Amino acid sequence: MSDIPFTPPPYSQKRTTKSLERSAAWLVDILRPSDNGVHEGEEHVAQPNVIVHMAGGASIPARKAFAETLAEALYAKEAELLKPLKHLNDGILGYVFDLVPLRLSLKTENTISDVVGDDDLDQGNTTRPIRAQIADFIPLLKASLAPLPESKVRLVNSTSCPHEVLQFIRDIGVDLFDAHWAQRAADIGVALDFKFPFGEESLDTLQQAHGKRDIGHNLYDTRYALDFSRLASCFLDGASATDLATACPCAACSPSAPTSHISHSLLDSFAKVEGSRILPPYTRAYLHHLLHTHEMSSHTLLVMHNITVLDAFFAGIRSVLSQENGKERFVTEVARFEKEYDEKLTVFDQARVLWAEVERARGKGRLAREKAKQNETTLGTAVELE
């Protein structure tokens, strides 16, 4: 980890300099070889297993300076201490970028007036469009990576949508991403429904946002109360697919019957189980019901589904890049994905509103709140009649 200030940005030049110096000093301490298993006259060869958080905040010169620290030759005490390493970068497996503090810094620099909470930062939910945020990120990440070799692993944490993922791969060459945003989507009742490369079979009349398709379904919405289709239109379910490779294999879309029977009494102790088989999928209407009744299984099913959709998304990216003209086709497919899918994440904004309303109805005082809401509705109706 890097020395990242916990005070609100912007930061002074002195504070930024101290942050870079501390981060480099901690890295030296981490890479310092242990005496365990090293005999006299032998050299300890460190195995690169450290992924370094690239310090520097929203300052391009600071990011460049920290990256150059990793690449420059060791000397004096540090050279002797880390021997046989010639550079700090020799003991590093890769580089990691956390977008949460970057979003906060860039938001302050762009003088956005609205208040952004932790959940907003997780999802990239600021007043700046996703495309504008990525345009701010790109030069910062490039400044950190320019002095360093391309062979090292590049990891980005806290992306907010597939559009960001695709642009970081295309413009920066990022290798790894976390899946936090897909799990947060499940928390607010969104079932992901997108694929890469885009296919015409993903058309869904309920999946539209300002002329573009949503990347998922807000299952808190009452429109899904009687929607008995599978969670994702982009994939078949296990029960209806002739080839399981075209189906979503998650336990929500392709649930399977158990291979063994658990006896609950002597009456069913002789029941026979014929073997595992794929059952019909859980439907959007069923998940809508579970969400509104606060069943924990709703989020479990959504997380399994969303992570599976994300896994298929990355498999599609690898498939495109592995082709002979992979880079050119990847650029084309990214442009097509951006054209087809809503990058404003409208479905996420709508889901947060409905999720908050349902959460508010839970627990102590629920009946009183519902009665107050009913009275407000009744009073509003009376005023209109007058």
Image (cartoon, rainbow, N blue to C red):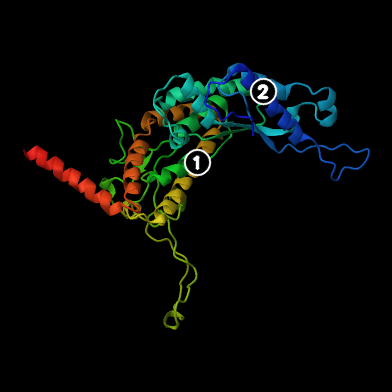
* Nearer to the camera, 329 or 98: 98
Which amino acid type is marked by label 2? Lys
Tell whether 137 sits left or right of 235: right
Which amino acid type is marked by label 1? His
For the N terminus, the quadrant is: top right
Residue 34 vs 115, above or below: the answer is below
| Dot in front, 1 or 2 | 2
Residue at the limit of the structure toward the bottom, as seen here: 266
Which numbered dot is residue 18?
Answer: 2
For the C terminus, the quadrant is: top left
In percent of width and height, residue 192 lies at 40, 43
Residue 257 vs 158, above or below: the answer is below
In percent of width and height, residue 159 lies at 50, 34
Dot 1 or dot 2: first in sequence order is 2
In percent of width and height, residue 231 lies at 36, 49
In whole angstroms, how far apart are the C-alphas of marks 1 and 2?
Answer: 30 Å
Q: Residues within 10 Å of mark 2 (few under 14, many from 20)?
A: few
Q: Are marks 1 and 2 in contact (CB under 8 Å)?
A: no
Q: Which residue is found at the position 55% from the left and 28% from the top? A: 7
Camera sees residue 272: yes
Q: Which residue is found at the position 23% from the left and 47% from the top? A: 372
Q: Which residue is found at the position 63% from the left and 24% from the top? A: 145
* Nearer to the camera, 263 or 293: 293
Q: Which residue is found at the position 33% from the left and 40% from the top? A: 353
In percent of width and height, residue 243 lies at 44, 52
Disc 1, SS: helix
What residue did someone put label 1 on?
180
